[in-house]
Amino acid sequence: MRSIGFPELVVIAAVFVLLFGTKKIPEFAKGLGEGIRNFKSAMKNEEEKPAGATATSATASDEKKQA
């Protein structure tokens, strides 16, 4: 199976420009970049969270059992 080469990428880019226009492409790229940045920060926060989250959820479940 062949991989996508330079001519195919040019055709894809041309179709993309025809579909969305030159004014929408920077907006699309900005939104894509912000989405990736938010995803990375969420993943970083999730890595830090589990150590503290398990202690808090265990405390909450213990409090419910006592009540």
Image: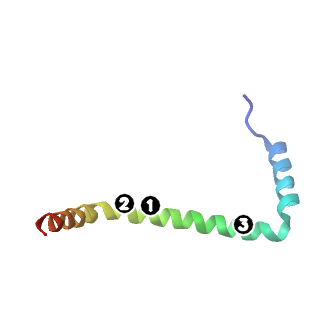
Displayed quadrant of residue 19: bottom right
Per the model, the C-alpha gap separating discs 1 and 2 is 6 Å
Residue 8 horizontal side relative to residue 36, left or right: right
Residue 45 horizontal side relative to residue 35, left or right: left
Q: Which residue is mark 3?
A: 28
Q: Which residue is mark 1?
A: 43
Q: Is residue 9 above or below residue 23?
A: above
Mark 3: which secondary structure?
helix
- Which kind of residue does numbered mark 3 sit on? Phe
Which residue is farthest front?
67
- Looking at the rendered image, the quarter that the N terminus falls into is top right
Mark 2: which secondary structure?
helix
Tell me where residue 25 appears, x and y as whole percent: 78, 66
Please tell me which residue lies in front, 2 or 54: 54
Q: Residue at x 11, y 67 (%)?
A: 66
Disc 3 crowd, CA 10 A, few/some/many (<14, 14-19, 20+): few
Mark 1: which secondary structure?
helix
Q: Which residue is mark 2?
A: 47
Tell me where residue 43 appears, x and y as whole percent: 44, 61
Tell me where residue 35 appears, x and y as whole percent: 59, 65
Sequence-first disc among 1 and 3: 3
CB within 8 Å, label 1 to label 2? yes
